[in-house]
Amino acid sequence: MSDMLNIALPKGRLGEKVYAMFEKAGFECPSIRENNRKLIFENPEAGVRYFWVKPSDVAIYVERGAADIGVAGKDILLEYAPDVYELLDMQLGKCRMAVAAPVGFNDDDTRRRPLKVATKFENIARRYYASIGRDIDIIHLNGSIEIAPILGLSDVIVDIVETGTTLKENDLCVYEEILPISARLIANKANFKFKQQAIRKLTDSLQEQINTRTEVQA
């Protein structure tokens, strides 16, 4: 096993914010800031290798051991339940998993039949509705979920809500909040044992940064 710490970063603005924190923690890799299309970046002196992956794939790379650690949304961890360690709430990418419906929707009107729920988060939706004893009919969609209730495909949707702007523009509103979502630092269970010192050093520094940021915001 390589001594280098392999880190999976989610592509996009979240990944850039995460890398900035890792860099501040002493795990810098200058080449990652160069303007190119490379996906893998190494800094042997710092003992670190980064690679960009699709946000929903980070947990797979970590679970399978291609990455020692990575940053994935809590939504992904809850939906797919990868066998990884969850080390830290990064307090980034904050949003919420929610039930949204057309303005004026009343579930009492649909109680005689299963509620039609459009979502790509089937497991989260099933657990939520099971917890409140509501029968549902899941309709799995991968995109443009907001139009499902507008076209009568579903009664409600279960999806991630950040600002709520898209919902408002489609005459939808949050009907029920299920749980808060944020980015989490995760680790491969086997690799954590062998690289525990480096991972703990990084985690401790990240926690200090989060604490400082929280104090400033307060």
Image (cartoon, helix red, strand yellow):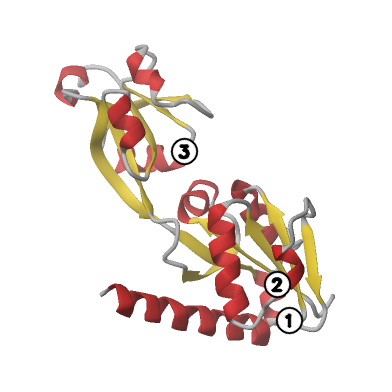
In x, y percent, where is residue 104?
16, 23
Q: Alpha-carbon distance for marks 1 and 2? A: 7 Å
For mark 2, give the secondary structure.
helix
Q: Which mark is residue 190?
A: 2
Q: Are marks 1 and 2 in contact (CB under 8 Å)?
A: yes
The answer to which quarter of the image holds residue 31 is bottom right
Classify the position of the C terminus by image quarter. Answer: bottom left
Relative placement, left or right, of 203 versus 4 is left
The answer to which quarter of the image holds residue 67 is bottom right
- Check disc 2: other Cα within 10 Å, few if <14, some if 14-19, many if 20+: some
The vertical placement of 41 against 218, above or below, is above
Q: Earlier in the sequence, mark 3 or mark 2?
A: 3
Q: Which mark is residue 194?
A: 1
Q: Alpha-carbon distance for marks 1 and 3? A: 34 Å
- Judging by the rendered image, the residue that carries numbered circle 3 is 121
In x, y percent, where is residue 80?
55, 48
Q: Measuring 46% from the left and 36% from the top, which residue is drawn there?
A: 122
In x, y percent, where is residue 96?
35, 48
The answer to whether residue 132 of the structure is visible from this angle is no
For mark 3, give the secondary structure.
loop
The vertical placement of 193 against 109, above or below, is below
For mark 1, give the secondary structure.
helix
In x, y percent, where is residue 124?
42, 43
Which residue appears farthest toward the front when viewing the image?
A: 35
